[in-house]
């Protein structure tokens, strides 16, 4: 079976407002899936409901073929980790204390902290490059470092699936690449299924195996980045006229939007002798 | 800010020191007073209590008030720590949450309208009042489009607190006969509480403490945010209900015994956190002993400061607590 996460006529919303309507979505196993769409299209809402942070109005979400409503929240936490969009950085706790929390779903009253837990926490910190800062307070770190610490916490959960809601927001371009490279490595090396909500289309096209563009409460297009990122999709989903060219580095599609600001050609004066 | 005691070993040593300090404070509380009682009489009284011996009677009263002080101190301190964890707000406490005022109002109602005197019965009134206030404040601070906000919880707490205090005052004004009996409750006191009447409250406080220790670990998750806690498989709503219940049991018990004693629930968790940080298992244990030590010593100070009269213990804690409250509030504003 290739789809570890699947939604079945899933309807989401707040009070009377429907955000996602009767959505059927399959998320392929062992791949990086990136959700894109205009502001307010419900991509974050969808991710949050897949992470059971938001209750569906109707429909079901299946994890490995089992309705998530049937699983206990702790059971889900052993299979699926989520990093929500707005994470406050907690006062007065260190990097290692935060990462340790990822082991919480694996602990019970009787089974307390073990050598194996310690090892897993250490590995999570090493693979995200935060091991050197283990004893530093989280609040003393930069935005990019903090995001890596949060990812380390979700890794310590040892789940097959990782859901990230706009993990690169508020980060500069170098840190954006750093976080997405980390996701790429986790997928390549550990075979994790990763689902990301991302604003930057060019980065999405670079890192996604599978892209899903949302519009009008449902899927507008899905497939490989080449299939999804087209001038037509840009026009329909983002109401933006674009050129789509090939990314010179990864050869994935790259969008260049038109704008009111047109080309400016500067006459170069050559003072030739 | 990081905790000062980093390793488990140092935290354990700190706890042992606190226990020693607690025993010393307990000894002081029984020894110090207008009437000096030789220490060997203490052991005599323990071995064989003689109700006709004046020294023994004095000791009996001192032991009783020490027991009240301990019970109130640890209850308010742990209750405050839990409410601060619940709201992620350093200014939360049973007092700020209106729990004390709610409990007091119900106690005054019980005394005035139902002529109830037994502390056990009063406890249930105090508990009901505490629960009502806590639920009102939590709901007012949480419900709405913007959802939960620490500032709104404090505002709601202030409003509910003012409401219950004015209800209480209104009742006292219209019914002066009870004023004397209720006045000491309002100031907060540990005097004249024979140890027998504390007995029914002790098991309730013990159960609440055990529950608090059982949910210590999930409470650590709450510190990193509701959504993170949910993502890690914690049933957040159930946990929060549990925290409110335990905090109310403790604060309700404290008010039933000693009336309105402010600031203990606010400042003790901060002192404890200074040493052990945000690991709630340690935090709760430290709060238990620091709370008891603070109250024992506040009682001793109140007893000897203006002899031959006494300052009510609630006034002493307020004298210590007010500057501390201002300090925390200023620090909090600087951060945000």
Image (tube, coloured by chain):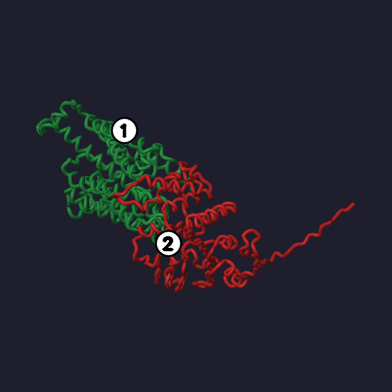
Chain colours: A red, B green
**Chain designation of label 1:** B
Q: Nearer the viewer, residue A64 or B329?
A: A64
Residue lying at 63% horizontally and 71% vertically, measured from the top left = A231
Residue B282 position within the rendered picture, expressed as x and y whole percent measured from the top left: 34, 42
Q: Real-space Cα distance between discs 2 and 1?
A: 45 Å
In the picture, the disc for residue B302 is: none
Q: Nearer the viewer, residue A203 or A116?
A: A116
Circles 2 and 1, Cβ within 8 Å, touching? The answer is: no
Residue B326 position within the rendered picture, expressed as x and y whole percent measured from the top left: 42, 42
In the rendered structure, the answer to whether residue A40 lies left or right of residue A239 reads left
Residue that label 2 marks: A51
Residue B180 position within the rendered picture, expressed as x and y whole percent measured from the top left: 22, 45
**Which quadrant of the view contains residue A261?**
bottom right
The reply to whether label 2 and label 1 mark residues of one chain is no
Residue A213 position within the rendered picture, expressed as x and y whole percent measured from the top left: 54, 68
In the rendered structure, the answer to whether residue A172 lies left or right of residue B110 reads right
Residue that label 1 marks: B17
Q: Nearer the viewer, mark 2 or mark 1?
A: 2
Dot 1 surroundings within 10 Å: few (below 14), some, or many (20 or more)?
few
Label 1, secondary structure: give it. helix
Label 2, secondary structure: give it. loop
Task: Tell me, yes or no, if residue B92 can be seen here.
Answer: yes
**Which quadrant of the view contains residue B140?**
bottom left
Task: Tell me, yes or no, if residue B165 can be seen here.
Answer: no
């Amino acid at each position: 079976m290739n789809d570890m996460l699947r939604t079945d006529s899933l309807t989401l919303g707040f009070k009377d407002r429907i955000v996602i309507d009767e959505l059927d979505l399959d998320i392929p196993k062992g791949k990086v899936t990136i959700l894109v769409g205009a502001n307010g299209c419900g991509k974050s809402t969808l991710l949050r409901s897949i992470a059971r942070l938001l209750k569906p109005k109707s429909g079901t979400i299946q994890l490995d073929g089992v309705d998530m409503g049937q699983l206990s929240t702790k059971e889900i936490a052993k299979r699926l980790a989520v990093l929500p969009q707005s994470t406050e950085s907690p006062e007065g706790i260190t990097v290692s204390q935060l990462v340790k929390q990822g082991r919480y779903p694996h602990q019970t009253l009787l089974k307390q902290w073990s050598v194996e837990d310690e090892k897993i926490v250490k590995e999570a910190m090493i693979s995200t490059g935060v091991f050197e800062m283990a004893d530093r307070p989280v609040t003393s770190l930069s935005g990019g470092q903090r995001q890596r610490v949060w990812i380390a916490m979700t890794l310590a959960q040892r789940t097959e699936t990782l859901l990230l809601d706009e993990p690169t927001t508020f980060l500069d371009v170098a840190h954006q690449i750093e976080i997405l490279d980390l996701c790429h490595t986790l997928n390549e090396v550990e075979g994790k299924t990763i689902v990301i909500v991302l604003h930057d289309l060019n980065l999405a096209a670079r890192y996604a195996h599978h892209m899903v563009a949302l519009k009008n409460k449902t899927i507008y297009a899905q497939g490989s980045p080449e299939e999804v990122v087209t001038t037509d999709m840009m026009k329909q989903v983002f109401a933006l006229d674009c050129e789509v060219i090939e990314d010179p580095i990864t050869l994935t599609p790259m969008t260049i939007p038109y704008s009111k600001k047109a080309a400016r050609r500067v006459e170069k004066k050559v003072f030739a002798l | 800010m990081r905790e000062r005691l980093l390793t488990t070993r140092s935290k354990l040593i700190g706890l042992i020191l606190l226990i020693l300090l607690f025993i010393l404070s307990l000894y002081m509380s029984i020894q110090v007073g207008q009437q000096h009682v030789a220490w060997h009489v203490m052991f005599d009284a323990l071995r064989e209590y003689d109700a006709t011996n004046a020294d023994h009677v004095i000791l009996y009263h001192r032991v009783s008030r020490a027991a009240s002080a301990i019970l109130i101190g640890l209850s308010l301190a742990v209750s405050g720590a839990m409410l601060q964890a619940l709201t992620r707000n350093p200014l939360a406490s049973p007092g700020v949450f209106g729990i004390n005022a709610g409990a007091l109002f119900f106690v005054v109602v019980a005394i005035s309208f139902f002529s109830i005197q037994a502390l056990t019965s009063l406890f249930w009134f105090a508990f009901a009042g505490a629960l009502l206030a806590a639920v009102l404040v939590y709901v007012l601070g949480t419900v709405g489009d913007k959802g939960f906000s620490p500032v709104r919880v404090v505002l709601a707490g202030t409003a509910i607190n003012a409401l219950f205090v004015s209800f209480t005052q209104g009742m006292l004004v219209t019914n002066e006969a009870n004023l004397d009996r209720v006045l000491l409750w309002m100031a907060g006191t540990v005097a004249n509480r024979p140890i027998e009447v504390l007995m029914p409250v002790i098991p309730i406080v013990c159960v609440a403490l055990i529950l608090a220790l059982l949910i210590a670990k999930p409470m650590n998750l709450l510190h990193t945010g509701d959504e993170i806690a949910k993502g890690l498989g914690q049933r957040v709503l159930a946990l929060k209900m549990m925290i409110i219940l335990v905090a109310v049991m403790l604060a309700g018990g404290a008010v039933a015994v000693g009336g309105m004693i402010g600031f203990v629930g606010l400042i003790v968790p901060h002192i404890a956190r200074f040493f052990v940080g945000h690991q709630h298992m340690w935090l709760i244990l430290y709060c238990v002993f620091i709370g008891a030590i603070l109250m024992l010593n506040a009682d001793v100070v109140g007893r000897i400061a203006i002899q031959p009269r006494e300052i009510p213990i609630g006034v002493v804690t307020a004298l210590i607590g007010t500057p501390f409250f201002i300090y925390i509030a200023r620090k909090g504003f600087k951060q945000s």
